[in-house]
Image (cartoon, rainbow, N blue to C red):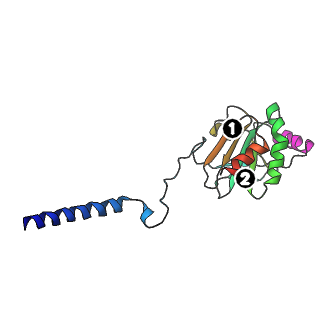
């Protein structure tokens, strides 16, 4: 009799432990995806993109925020030789991926009329935002230009590069998302 009681007690303890183990697990037993904690906002790879608003060259205010679409940001200036070198490829990228990828070239600390003249002279059509005070560049800790960031559909920065970027590099990053 005591042997049966011991076996029953051990069985009850094992069942209790097993039920506690199942209760502590993510929803993997139900087939649902476990919820990931939200990413910390920041400006480096793996962080959630901080929202910001800047004027476009046409004067309208543009808010850049994760919105379920891949986003590419390129920080640059007209006087920067490597920036000028990559502009034809960026313009081609922006045109080729229009509607599929949100793209903004963020000009840092230059008057809008100078930037507009540069864009017109070179027949570039990509979206340009004006960071005339350099506040967004400070937020993103831009220490060298050009700097390019790629943000996935969930708003997480997946790629950051200081230096010129090519169309092929950007396509490679997009294919990896």
Q: Residue at x 82, y 43 (%)?
A: 89
Magenta region includes residue 52 = no
Residue 4 coordinates in the image, percent (x, y)? 12, 67
Q: Nearer the viewer, residue 109 or 97?
A: 97
Residue 26 coordinates in the image, percent (x, y)? 42, 60
Name the element at disc 2.
strand
Q: Nearer the viewer, residue 112 or 32?
A: 32
Residue identified by numbered label 1: 161
Q: In the picture shown, does residue 93 fall above or below 30?
A: above
Quarter holding residue 16: bottom left
Residue 22, visible in the rendered structure = yes
Quadrant holding the N terminus: bottom left
Residue 12 coordinates in the image, percent (x, y)? 21, 65
Predominant SS along the magenta part: helix
Instruction: Determine whether, in the image, residue 147 is placed left or right of residue 121.
Output: left
Instruction: Determine whether, in the image, residue 111 is placed left or right of residue 143.
Output: right
Residue 143 coordinates in the image, percent (x, y)? 67, 31
Q: How would you rate the neighbour count of disc 1 (Cα within 10 Å): few for under 14, some for 14-19, many for 20 or more? A: some
Q: Residue at x 80, y 50 (%)?
A: 94
| Marks 2 and 1, the one that precedes in the sequence | 2
Residue farthest to the left, as pictured: 1
Residues at discs 2 and 1 in contact (Cβ within 8 Å)? no
Residue farthest to the right, as pictured: 121
Residue 126, visible in the rendered structure = no
Name the element at disc 1.
strand
Question: For residue 62, which numbered disc appears in the image?
Answer: 2
Magenta region includes residue 113 = yes
The residue mark sitting in front, 2 or 1, is 1
Q: Nearer the viewer, residue 31 or 74?
A: 31
Mark 2 to mark 1: distance in Å? 23 Å
User: What span is in magenta?
Assistant: 111-122
């Amino acid at each position: 009799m005591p042997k049966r009681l011991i076996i029953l007690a051990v069985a009850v303890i094992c069942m209790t432990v097993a039920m506690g183990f199942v209760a502590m697990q993510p929803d993997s037993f139900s087939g649902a995806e476990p919820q990931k904690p939200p990413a910390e906002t920041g400006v480096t790879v793996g962080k959630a993109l901080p929202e910001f608003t800047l004027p476009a060259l046409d004067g309208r205010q543009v808010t850049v925020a994760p919105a379920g679409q891949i986003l590419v940001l390129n920080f640059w200036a007209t006087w920067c030789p490597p920036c000028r070198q990559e502009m034809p490829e960026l313009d081609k990228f922006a045109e080729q991926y229009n509607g599929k990828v949100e793209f903004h070239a963020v000009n840092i600390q230059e008057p809008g009329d100078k930037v507009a003249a540069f864009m017109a002279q070179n027949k570039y059509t990509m979206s340009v935002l004006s960071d005339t005070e350099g506040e967004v560049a400070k937020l993103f800790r831009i220490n060298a230009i050009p700097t390019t960031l790629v943000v996935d559909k969930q708003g997480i920065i997946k790629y950051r590069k200081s230096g010129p970027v090519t169309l092929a590099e950007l396509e490679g990053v997009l294919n990896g998302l």
